[in-house]
Image: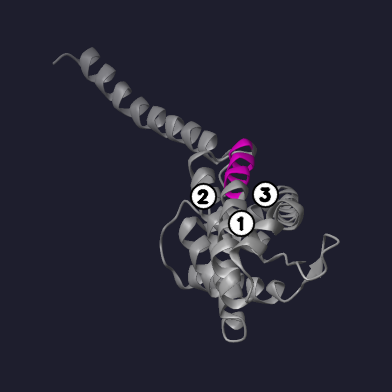
Amino acid sequence: MSISSRIRMQAIRSVAPEAEGAAGSTANAKLGSHSTGVADSGRWSTRRIAMYALFVALAMVTSFIEFPITPVAWLKYDPSGIVCLIAGFAYGPSAAIIVSVLGFVPHMFADPWGSLMAVLVALCLSVPASLIYRKIRSRKGAALGILAGAVLAIVAALLGNLVITPIYAHMSYAAVAAMILPILLPFNLAKMAIHAVVTFLIYKPISNLLAKQQ
């Protein structure tokens, strides 16, 4: 091999790693434009478990903050669903499941049937939302995820009322069905609207804060 050929080969070898590094940086920049950098890692580190525990504790606390949002005073709103959504966006569907289930454990002793419905609604809201957001890491993905989760959660809430409420509230199926349009549907629409708006406004700052702590 001639001297000039050797020089060209060395030049190519020295440039190739730089090109690969630049391409990798560009790809990472594109991926990270909306990614929080938190849910991308599936490692069950001590810190990750601690953050799950923190979200579970927040869900427990917020589940006790109840107040009416419609003229029907016995139907009360609590913001625990927002915590489940944020956990799912930040750490993925596994976090959404864990927080949605464990967050209502304190209520299961006093109100097992109501807690079962609350867990069902929280799962239907947060798990689909986190799955969609994991695929589409942007505000559009977050909006689509929240919308899909809210629709499923409303359906689950209405069906849950039809099946479970007659069992523990000693009401007939017909009586519960008669409440769907005038009472249950408006309440659940208002509930999911609050969840959606608040989550959409705060999820990104919180996720970015969590990502910086990694």
Image height check: is 95 above or below 148?
A: below
Mark 1 Cα shell of 10 Å, populated few (<14), some (14-19), many (≥20): many
Of badges 2 and 1, nearer the viewer stands: 1
Of badges 2 and 3, nearer the viewer stands: 2
Q: Position of residue 131 (x, y in %)?
A: 49, 48
Q: Nearer the viewer, residue 160 or 80?
A: 160
Separation of residues labelled 3 and 1 (CA atoms): 30 Å
Residue at image point 38% right, 31% down: 20
Indicate the amino acid at tag 1. Answer: Leu
Q: Position of residue 111 (x, y in %)?
A: 61, 81
Q: Is residue 167 magenta?
A: no
Residue at image point 53% right, 51% down: 130
Quarter holding the C terminus is bottom right
Q: Which residue is mark 3?
A: 204
Instruction: Look at the numbered disc 1 and give the secondary structure of its residue.
Output: helix
Of badges 3 and 1, nearer the viewer stands: 1
Instruction: Look at the numbered disc 2 and give the secondary structure of its residue.
Output: helix
Q: Position of residue 133 (x, y in %)?
A: 54, 44
Instruction: Choose the circle earlier in sequence order: 2 or 1.
Output: 2
Q: Nearer the viewer, residue 147 or 18?
A: 147
Q: Nearer the viewer, residue 147 or 213?
A: 147
Instruction: Choose the circle earlier in sequence order: 2 or 3.
Output: 2
Q: Which residues are magenta?
A: 140-149
Residue at image point 72% right, 53% down: 202
Q: Which residue is mark 2?
A: 128
Q: Which residue is mark 1?
A: 158
Mark 3 Cα shell of 10 Å, populated few (<14), some (14-19), many (≥20): many
Mark 2 Cα shell of 10 Å, populated few (<14), some (14-19), many (≥20): many
Residue 21 showing in the rendered view: yes
Separation of residues labelled 2 and 3 (CA atoms): 18 Å
Q: Position of residue 158 (x, y in %)?
A: 61, 56
**Which quadrant would residue 161 be assigned to in this image?**
bottom right
